[in-house]
Image: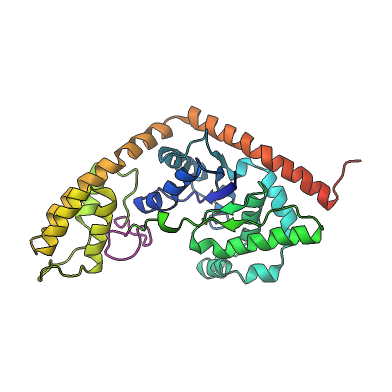
Amino acid sequence: MEKVVSGIRPTGKLHLGNYFGAVRNFVKMQHEHNCYFFIADYHSLTTHPTPEDLHGNVKHVLAEYIACGLDPEKATLYIQSDLHEVTELYLLLNMNAYVGELERCTSFKEKVRKQPENVNAGLLTYPALMAADVIIHKASKVPVGKDQEQNLEMMRTFARRFNRIYGIEYFPIPQAYNFGDALVKIPGLDGSGKMGKSEGETNAIFLSDEPALIRKKVMRAVTDAGPSEMNQKKPEPIQNLFTLMDVISSPKTVQYFEDQYNTCKIRYGDMKKQLAEDVIGFTEPFREKIKELLSNDHYLRKVTRKGAAKARESAGTTIKEVREIIGFKPF
Ligand code: TRP
């Protein structure tokens, strides 16, 4: 079985875009591969060195992923900072990571632009930590989005370099796991772009949103004056509403509003009311499960302990072998 590793940023709550993007695919993958999913809390310090509520954010993300179907019995689900072995591999990889190549990474340059007041070394060596996350399990596949391609390339560079420098084919060279068509892009409610792309609280529907808030957000979604010709092509904000309805509502409902649109009889208010109710119905099991998990520290503790122990099985072996390969030996 292929070993798969991916890190989850402990930022914010999950929205429908996250769910129909990576999250649902993680859930599927856990049945087909040997998956390691972790919450990247070390990484989050590179942008938020003094986080307001690190523990709370980690807890939220953990509860939400479990609520979405990540099964701690199937996948190895852990918190990055529980796996101290990863920091040791990170240190060792840093010895063979060159400042020049790290400085050339676009994500680093972007961060320099975004937070010029805090260009810390952790930011520079972010790709080395990410490489450590993956190769500590000697994993071969990494399911990440397009924005992580360069980090993945750096990961391969570090793995290959380790093998070359120490003269041993030790680390597998990790490849991207491509979701392809399985990634459904969910548009935002503000008329353009992806859900979650803009910061506005009304652009995204979160899995934990209460029904009243969902109604409010959907009713505020951007529309226009309506079609003036039969079978008219839909402008972007309208197409977005239909796209959302397509993934959430029943085919019959979608067809009804398609017909209404094509015959210029559509009332967006009615469509949004229906969509809001369908979204509420769809998110209800998630909402309930998230609440239940957030109030069950005992269970979350059990999950993270078990996850860390499972992760340590492979990480511990790797660190032991890496130390020997480099030449650290007991007297
Ligand atoms: N950098 C990734 C992101 O921003 C998160 C991450 C950290 C990650 N370590 C990883 C992803 C290892 C895959 C593998 O989304």
Can residue 125 be spotted in the picture? no
Work out which quarter of the rendered image holds the C terminus and state it: top right
Magenta range is 187-203
Q: Quadrant of residue 69?
A: top left
Instruction: Tell me if residue 160 comes above or below residue 297 in the rendering.
Output: below
State the scheme by which the image is colored.
rainbow
> Between residues 62 and 151, which one lies in front from this camera angle?
151
Residue found at the far top of this picture: 298
Q: Point out residue 315 in the picture as x, y percentages from the top left corner.
A: 68, 43
- Whether 194 is among the magenta residues is yes
Q: Which residue is drawn at 63% across and 56% down?
A: 174
Q: Residue at x 54, y 39 (%)?
A: 75
Q: Is residue 186 left or right of residue 302?
A: left
Dominant SS of magenta comes to: loop
Ligand 1 is found in which quarter of the picture?
bottom right
Can residue 258 be spotted in the picture? yes
Q: Point out residue 124 in the picture as x, y percentages from the top left corner.
A: 63, 63
> Between residues 223 and 238, which one lies in front from this camera angle?
238
Instruction: Tell me if residue 106 comes above or below residue 52 in the rendering.
Output: below
- Whether 142 is among the magenta residues is no
Q: Is residue 113 left or right of residue 279?
A: right
